[in-house]
Amino acid sequence: MSRWSAIRKAKAWLDRQPVYLDTETTGLGPEAEVIEIAIVDADGRPLLDTLIRPQGEVPEDASRVHGLTTAMLQGAPTWPQVWPQIQAALAGRLVLMYNASYDLRVMEQTAARYGMTFDIPGAEFGDLLELYSEYKGVRGQEGDLRRWRLEQAGRELQIPIPNSHRALDDTLLAREVHRKIANEPLPWG
């Protein structure tokens, strides 16, 4: 896909009034759980911004990234308590995430820990990391498109929202990355 194709895709996604989602988690592996989730609408208004109490502990290496600790989450709702709000915010919508495969995997893992199925009727998921990689068009030695961290994308697009590694800030930054690409002019108008 070319830069122009990425811009066309971004414009088409923007026309659909997507929602944006980000999570913070207890780690990267198969046992990781969601401990914070934010969902914002196309205008950047929060639809959901909440901490989530995990079944397990928050490892120190994860805490160093986002600053969340097990103690901070003790009074937070659990995944089953937040799940109806997540479903309501996402059902029937285009949901955009920066590194969607990761967020989706950890949400599925978290649901499975509670014996729940991760199912959102009518939702379609798009990946802003893939979109940005296509937009940049830089290939590595293997010929694959280079992957860019969210903070790199924000910096390169001169977006003043910091990448704080907290769900709401990162959701707003991902939204702005999408909008910057979508607002690029195409060569033929």
Image (cartoon, rainbow, N blue to C red):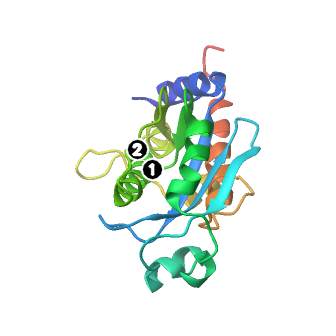
Kindly identify the residue that appears in the image at 75 percent across and 57 percent down: 160
The N terminus lies in quadrant: top left
In the foreground, 165 or 34: 34
In the rendered image, residue 59, in percent from the top left (x then y), is placed at 43, 82
Left or right, 170 with respect to 5, comes to right
Q: Amino acid at mark 1?
A: Asn
Kindly identify the residue that appears in the image at 54 percent across and 63 percent down: 78
Query: Regarding mark 1 in the picture, which secondary structure is present there?
Result: loop
Q: Looking at the image, is 107 positioned above or below residue 52? A: above
In the foreground, 42 or 116: 116
Instruction: Tell me if mark 2 has few (under 14), some (14-19) or many (20+) residues whose alpha carbon lies within 10 angstroms of its own.
Output: some
Q: Which residue is mark 2?
A: 118
Query: Regarding mark 2 in the picture, which secondary structure is present there?
Result: loop
The C terminus lies in quadrant: top right
In the rendered image, residue 80, in percent from the top left (x then y), is placed at 50, 55
Where residue 114 sits, quadrant-wise, is bottom left
In the rendered image, residue 107, in percent from the top left (x then y), is placed at 43, 53
Q: Which residue is mark 1?
A: 99
Q: Looking at the image, is 61 positioned above or below residue 33? A: below
Left or right, 56 with respect to 19, comes to left
